[in-house]
Image (cartoon, grey):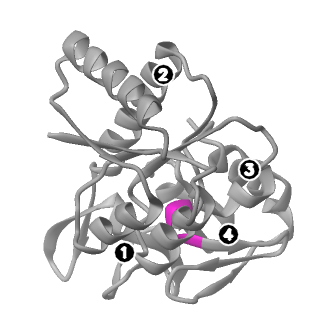
Amino acid sequence: MYNIGICDDEHAACAQIAEMIYEYDRRNKVGIEVTVWNTGEGLYQDMQKKKAIDLLFLDIELVSTDGIQVGRLIRRELENQDISIAYISSKSSYALELFKIHPIDFLIKPVSAQDIYETIDEALRLYDRNNTVFEYKANGYNCKIPYREIRYFYSENKKINMVTADATVQFTGKIKDLAGMVPGNFIQIHQSYIINMNHMSECSYELVRMNGGAELNISQPYRKQVRKQIMDYAWGQDT
């Protein structure tokens, strides 16, 4: 089951988007469940209770807790980097505010069926990618871990260290080889570091801060390309 949420204080807009989603499901037979909220508070409360959402169509101009605030709560308070957020707005002037939330899309009202279909296509592609696994060998065992759980890799003394929320695991390998096999949401920022942008909380020209507080330097040769990759990924354009 693929779970899609809609949060908009306009009941008619919710009904229209829901019907577009159901039509997409009738055509593509994904197996989609739709849940609707009319307030940001209601959405956030349900997410605190572990309500499963894979893709969220989120209106920015909600009456009380607006969509930007909700997005920040999802990313920072709940530390949920997996959910794909597609913002919906009647305005187009939110670029800077949305950057750190990493939306998958930004749709201008009135949204069309084609807008919704293309967003779902992209979200499903990312869902498939994020649920693939990284395979490695450590301490004589063949191991697997979902890519979405990996925050970053770093090399040290001819070993690679893989950092997750719970542990740091070491195995034999080379960063340059690893860079050619990881998904597109992983980028190399230094000859010794590869990060998962889904776990990046802040970024400057010279530094990234990861979930968990680690601060990693972006080395000079990588800065221009890293900046472009991060900007592209922030708007769901990374391939």
Q: Is residue 54 visible?
A: yes
Image x and y of residue 99, in percent:
70, 57
Taking 129 as reference, is 217 above or below it?
below
Provide the residue designation for mark 3: 231
Query: In which quarter of the view is residue 89 placed?
Result: top right
The C terminus is located in which quarter? top right
Residue at 15% across, 29% down: 31
Q: CA distance from mark 2 to mark 1?
A: 40 Å
Residue at 50% across, 69% down: 75
Q: CA distance from mark 3 to mark 2?
A: 20 Å
Query: Mark 4 or mark 1: which comes first in sequence?
Result: 1
Q: Is residue 159 visible?
A: no
Asked whether disc 4 touches disc 1, contact meaning CB atoms under 8 Å apart, the reply is no
Horizontal side of residue 218 vs 16, given as left or right? right
Q: Which mark is residue 191?
A: 4
Q: Residues within 10 Å of mark 3 (few under 14, many from 20)?
A: some
Q: CA distance from mark 4 to mark 3?
A: 21 Å
Image x and y of residue 206, in percent:
83, 74
Horizontal side of residue 77 vs 59, given as left or right? left
Residue type at tag 2:
Glu
Span highlighted in magenta in the image: 196-200
Specify the farthest residue to the top: 27
Provide the residue designation for mark 2: 118
Residue type at tag 3:
Met
Provide the residue designation for mark 1: 172
14 or 138, nearer to the observer: 14
Task: Identify the main secondary structure in magenta.
Answer: helix
